[in-house]
Amino acid sequence: MLTLNTRGHLLKVLQGLQATGWHIDKVPAQGAIARNGQKFILTSPGLEIKIRLFVYKVTGSGRSRPNERRIEITTTYNSGLQKARGFHDVVLGYNEETDSFVGVDPRRLSFGGTTHNASSFFDLEGIKKTKAKRLLIMSRKANRNLFSTEIEYHGFFDQTKLAEYLFNYSEIHNGTYTGSGSFSAEAKISSRKPESEVSENRATGDLVVLTTSRQPQTKAKVNNGLVKAVEGSNFKRLKRARLTPGQLRDIMRYCEEVGSLAEQFVVDHERRRLTRLGHIKAASEVERVSLTSVGEGYDIISFEDDGVTKRFLEVKGTTGAGMTVDMSDNEWETAKLLKTSYYLVRVIRVKTNPSHSYFKNPVELEQDGVLTRLPNGWRVKLPKHT
């Protein structure tokens, strides 16, 4: 028997896949798994992928930003890395503190030049919000020279979602993944210990080959029309659809992810605004309080242009472009209390081409007729332009 050995974090990926029903068919000669750039073949009934996997440690950003983390990619195509024919490159970060992973857009391997400076930065909120058995996708403003859309997507997940990420990474990083891809159904955790030794006849060549009897089943795709019905509280449409509790949970999960993307979009905007104004410390202190408390009546604490006076932002995001949103009693009462310090921020087309509008002191705007309360509770109709 040969003991599997690697000096990097790839072993965590191998162990995580085994925990969710994948079995080792083959490993490289002498059981020596590469520290990085290891080639994997994952085979399931009717589906196979070939990937070359890079896993880097999640570290501090090195930019005096306490709410920021990074994955420092040390090898790129420009610094000598050769592409592996027939294999797609996949890049992960491993966070030791939470035993979780961050999926990075593999296009990062095209950047960096001879300095290897291809770090991918992301907000600490993504790690904090990582939950068991859930794949969270968050967006971040990116340099246009790197990404033409100026948006970079990161995936945050634990070992139970490794297969889902690996089989759907392309859609995840181009912003089109809706959570219904291969292996998106919940995985059962195996009670068997991951293999740490293999027989010599399974140790040849340079590949890690894993197989599973798991079907690459997907969750039912979320109907965009029903998502918009939920976002717009179109109860007639929802009643006609005769949603099952499971379908409604899938839609609400999708809407929650849309809301999370919208909040992160606004956090990024606030930090850039304050940085441009020279308030570097204030920019680092912008806080997404919704991650730790859901009862504050707002999602984000930021600062006005002076870098000192606090502003409180309640974010409303949807996939569509409508300007009618729901506000809870708590949100409206908080807006009444905070007055000019309170902003309602509308983010539209969150998944495709996000843009946003700020509405300062919505209670006063309602009194002035700029913002209209609708009969259905605290539903408010916002003007298209401010």
Image (cartoon, rainbow, N blue to C red):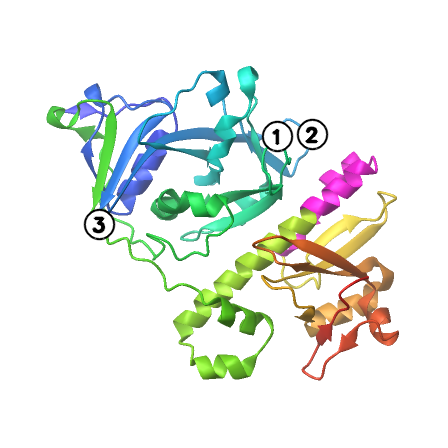
Q: Quadrant of the N terminus?
A: top left
Quarter of the figure with the C terminus: bottom right
Q: Residues within 10 Å of mark 1 (few under 14, many from 20)?
A: some
Instruction: Identify the residue shown where x is 59% and y is 41%.
Output: 124
Classify 194 as above or below 344: above
User: Which quadrant of the figure has residue 94?
Assistant: top left
Q: Residues within 10 Å of mark 2 (few under 14, many from 20)?
A: few
**Along the line of sight, the residue nearer the viewer: 179 or 299:** 179
Q: Can residue 161 be seen in this snapshot?
A: yes
Q: Which amino acid type is marked by label 2?
A: Ser
Mark 3 — residue? 46
Q: Is 181 left or right of 70, judged from the image as shown?
A: left
Query: Label 1 sits on what residue type?
Result: Ser
Q: Which of pointers 3 and 1 indicates the residue nearer the eye?
A: 3
Q: Which mark is residue 64?
A: 2
- State the residue in front, 183 or 286: 183
User: Tag 2, which secondary structure?
Assistant: loop
Which residue in the protein does label 1 denote? 61
Magenta span includes 314? no
Q: Amino acid at mark 3?
A: Gly
Q: Residues within 10 Å of mark 3 (few under 14, many from 20)?
A: few
Are the residues tagged 2 and 1 within 8 Å (C-beta)?
yes
Instruction: Report the residue at 83% width, 74% height from top.
Output: 366
Q: Is residue 63 above or below residue 279?
A: above
Where does the magenta region start and end?
268-291
The rendered magenta stretch, by its main secondary structure, is classed as helix
- Quadrant in which residue 198 is drawn: top left
Between residues 34 and 350, which one lies in front from this camera angle?
350
Q: Position of residue 137 (x, y in %)?
A: 51, 49
Question: How far apart are labels 2 and 1 at the CA level?
Answer: 7 Å
